[in-house]
Amino acid sequence: MPIVVRIDVELAERKMSVGEFAERVGLTPANVAVLKNGRAKAVRFSTLEAMCRVLECQPGDLLEWVED
């Protein structure tokens, strides 16, 4: 998949657990896993906004386009 989700990198830099992140964003840990593993087909802007707010980052810090 040409879009790589870098949530795990951002979580590691902040020493934040998936459970804490999920709770603060308003997602289930299972849905965070779907995002982290690149299995999500879409992300709502409201969810992306919440993730950026919690991690204090920009969308480009979480999503990266990689050529096949």
Image (cartoon, rainbow, N blue to C red):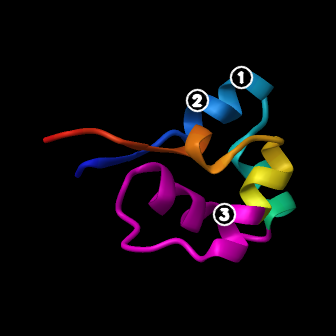
Q: How many marks?
A: 3
- Select label 3 or label 2 by which is in front: 3
Q: Are marks 3 and 1 in contact (CB under 8 Å)?
A: no
In the image: residue 8, left or right of residue 4: right
State whether residue 8 is above or below residue 5. Answer: above
Q: Are marks 1 and 2 in contact (CB under 8 Å)?
A: yes
Picture coordinates of residue 15, whole percent (x, y): 78, 26
Region of the chain picked out in magenta, as a range? 26-49
Question: In the rendering, which numbered label is found on residue 55?
Answer: none
* Residue at the extreme left of the image, as rendered: 68
- Select label 3 or label 1 by which is in front: 3
Three-letter amino acid code at disc 3?
A: Leu
For the point 79% across and 43% down, the residue is 55
Q: Is residue 28 in view from this perspective?
A: no
For the point 40% across and 67% down, the residue is 40
Residue ID for mark 3: 48
Residue ID for mark 1: 13
Q: Nearer the viewer, residue 11 or 29?
A: 11
In the image: residue 33, left or right of residue 26: left
Report crowding for label 2: few under 14, some 14 to 19, many 20 or more residues within 10 A (C-alpha): few
Picture coordinates of residue 67, whole percent (x, y): 20, 39
Residue ID for mark 2: 9
Q: Secondary structure at mark 2?
A: helix
In the image: residue 60, left or right of residue 42: right
